[in-house]
Amino acid sequence: MLALAVAALACTTLSASADTGTGGVPVVVAGSSGGQIHHCTVVGQPADGYQAVICADINTSQTDSARDYEATGAIEVLCETTAGVTVRCANIDIEGVFANGVSSTDKDAGWWGCGHSLGDCPTGRKIITEGRINYSGSAYPACLDNPNSNFDLWTVVYGGTTQIELPVSDKYVTLGAGSGANDGSNFSTGHYYVCPYDPE
């Protein structure tokens, strides 16, 4: 259990502003170094010393100027030993979405798979980009005050349809309720407001 907890914490990073916007939603700043939200969880229970990990990400970067920036959603998936050494998964079926607060419009929803008839899974972690939003011009204070806008972003990995086959045991683990910080049976970054580096 300790190894499980360490592995889950080791791949959780937050590079975001401590500020919050309307409703207490945290703010991530698209600074020159790029603000990133990276939440991970172990899926199901390990078997024969192996486990599956999925991560939900929001990545940001400046584009043409301090006022022009972009945000992308991504899902990461990997298999590893319980000691944290990355290995090839036997099979992956994963589905998710990068969404914003504009009428809950999904920016991109997609499925990705590997293994068996689809060919070998990668030896390292697989990163699946789920969508991109570009912003231009001054975004303040709108990026802090609009929970139903395109500044309000989140990435979701769908439970139920996300299944990973572990190596050696060939055991399938399925993302679902009880496997982490879930939204129902899904796994999510949670909501974040994305703002530019320069508030002027």
Image (cartoon, grey):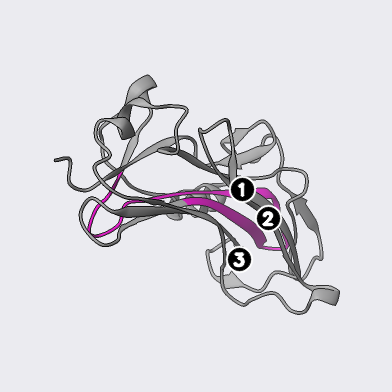
Tell me where residue 75 sits by quadrant: bottom right
Classed neighbour count for the residue bearing mark 1: other residues with Cα under 10 Å, few (<14), some (14–19), many (≥20) = many
Residue 170 seen anywhere in this rendered image of the structure: yes
Query: Which residue is nearer to you in this view: 121 or 70?
Result: 70
| Residue picked out by circle 2 | 110
| Mark pair 1, 3: CA separation | 27 Å
| Residue picked out by circle 3 | 81
**Would you say the residues marked 2 and 1 are in contact, meaning their CB atoms lie under 8 Å apart?**
yes
Instruction: Mark 1 or mark 3: name the one nearer the start of the chain.
Output: 3
| Residue picked out by circle 1 | 97
Q: Amino acid at mark 2?
A: Gly
Tell me where residue 160 sits by quadrant: top right
| Residue 162 point in image, percent of width and height | 73, 51
Q: Is residue 197 left or right of residue 44?
A: left
Q: Amino acid at mark 3?
A: Thr
Instruction: Mark 3 or mark 2: name the one nearer the start of the chain.
Output: 3
Q: Which residues fall within the magenta stretch?
A: 29-57
Image point 61% across, 35% down: which residue?
A: 182
For marks 1 and 3, give the one nearer the viewer.
Answer: 1
Query: Which residue is nearer to you in this view: 142 or 93?
Result: 142
User: In what quadrant of the picture does the C terminus appear?
Assistant: top left
Instruction: Mark 2 or mark 1: name the one nearer the start of the chain.
Output: 1
Residue 74 seen anywhere in this rendered image of the structure: no
Query: Which residue is nearer to you in this view: 94 or 51?
Result: 94
As drawn, which residue projects farthest toward the top?
Answer: 23
Query: Which residue is nearer to you in this view: 49 or 174?
Result: 174
| Mark pair 3, 2: CA separation | 27 Å
Q: Is residue 72 left or right of residue 55?
A: left
